[in-house]
Image: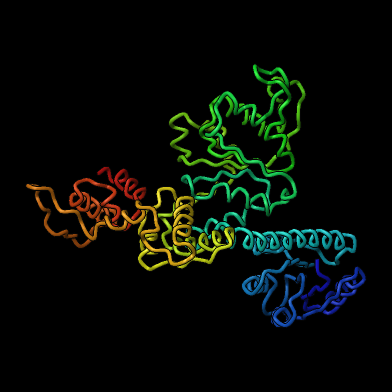
Amino acid sequence: MGDHILVVDDEVGSREGLRRLLEALGYATTTAASAEEALESVRRDPPAAVFTDLVMPGVDGLEFIRRLQLERELPVVVFSAQGTIEQAVEAMKLGAQDFLEKPVEAVRLKMLLTRLGRTRELEVKNRRLKAELRERGAFERLRGDSEKMRIVFRQIEQVAASTLSVLIVGESGTGKELVAQTLHEVSGRRRQEFVAINCAAIPDTLLESEIFGHERGAFTGAVQRKIGCFEMAHRGTLFLDEIAEMNESLQAKLLRVLQEQRFRRVGGREVIEADVRVITATNRDPRKAIAEGKLREDLYYRLNVFTIVLPSLRERPEDVRPLARHFAVQYATRTGTTIPVFDRAAMDALIGHSWPGNVRELKNAVERAALLSDGGTILPEHLPPEVVASRSTQPLGPAPPAEGQHVPPPLTIPLGSTMDAVERETILRTLEYTRGNKTQAAKVLGVSLKTMHNKVKKYRL
């Protein structure tokens, strides 16, 4: 903890006694005789911590803590000879770190200061990790200025420094592995291995061996010992992508390893300790995967300590422009060519595309266009045909009714209708115009296809 402490007490003897005690322990100390004087002192020269009496004339200790916390977050310790237990509890609720009785004992004070110092060191470390995260993640690879991505960044900041298991949910191509790498790189395990494995890309018969390793002769073809991903990631991070594609028996074994923090190689007897932070990901809705028998419910609850949901690119179209420019710069830097610029029509086409392949598809499209433009201007003809076609086929309004189909009259909403009733009627009438085509209806209403499906299910349309 820093060496500057502010003592607030209206009793001069008590105030000066605590000041001398703190200075004897090596802390620079300033004093204030009232809450008002203390607030002015904090504004002029913020201390590392504040020690305040509870019972003071005018603004008492509790009100002082309230006002102080509105201006800045500082460690606060309360002390009093007259204060009640109820006052001490209320002070703790307001953010006080501890409570001391007068007269303050030197041994008790020294222990408290040591603990406050450790807490402050952890806070400084956490702020450093958050700054490193913003530099490495949000501004390097996990780009995006939309509110949906800012939520993701805040979630990563909250969990990065911990050892909690994290489940990342998102469509293919949204950047789930980048999130896992960022979590590893700003954690205390960053100097150890980050090991990633895609459970959907390896046959069931080999996946167990890839994860846990095997001994020589464990099965046909096992001609030598193999070290698995769990062992390679010891004291580091293991990322299991598409966890819902793992078969049920292997999910059961994984659950046991996560609970016991130890495992055996396939065909082995040696028990191996597993100090591994496990991060998992899936492109499925976890609840739906559980209902379909694809994901064990008990494993889900073990993995789902903290969940990060990555939005699809079509849910954050405002990020397409900065991402496209970023990928163009990346390509030019890697190939040593001139950074291409985007023709307005080309950028409009990029923004208008639905990007079923998400950020991965956008990156591939931009790199293809940069290659074809030869470092010049990227035109619509340099983009993949499906990107340009999706823009040209976007409806400007409702689809016309089929021949002989009744044309609904103009939509009229009775005054006093609930918002749900208005929304249901709007979606219903839009589906009538688009002849039941949910994709077109979603575009007409300016929502994602996923949102349209959810609304149709909600209102049973």
Residue at the outermost right position: 24
Quadrant where the C terminus is found in the figure: top left
Compared to 263, does 180 lie above or below? Answer: below
In the picture, measured across the screen, residue 291 lies left or right of residue 333, that is left
Q: Give residue 70's quadrant in the image.
A: bottom right
Judging depth in this view, the residue of 403 and 83 nearest the camera is 403
Residue at 52% from the left image edge and 58% from the top image edge: 151
Residue at 36% from the left image edge and 61% from the top image edge: 380
Q: Give residue 105's quadrant in the image.
A: bottom right
Judging depth in this view, the residue of 308 and 67 nearest the camera is 308
Q: Give residue 248's quadrant in the image.
A: top right
Q: Position of residue 207 (x, y in %)?
A: 60, 28
Quadrant where the N terminus is found in the figure: bottom right
Q: Position of residue 412 (x, y in %)?
A: 16, 60
Q: How many marks?
A: 0
The colour style of the image is rainbow
Q: Position of residue 277 (x, y in %)?
A: 67, 42
In the picture, measured across the screen, residue 99 lies left or right of residue 373, that is right
Q: Position of residue 381 (x, y in %)?
A: 36, 59
Compared to 122, does 309 lie above or below? Answer: above
Residue at the outermost front position: 374
Judging depth in this view, the residue of 327 and 154 nearest the camera is 327
Compared to 415, does 238 lie above or below? Answer: above
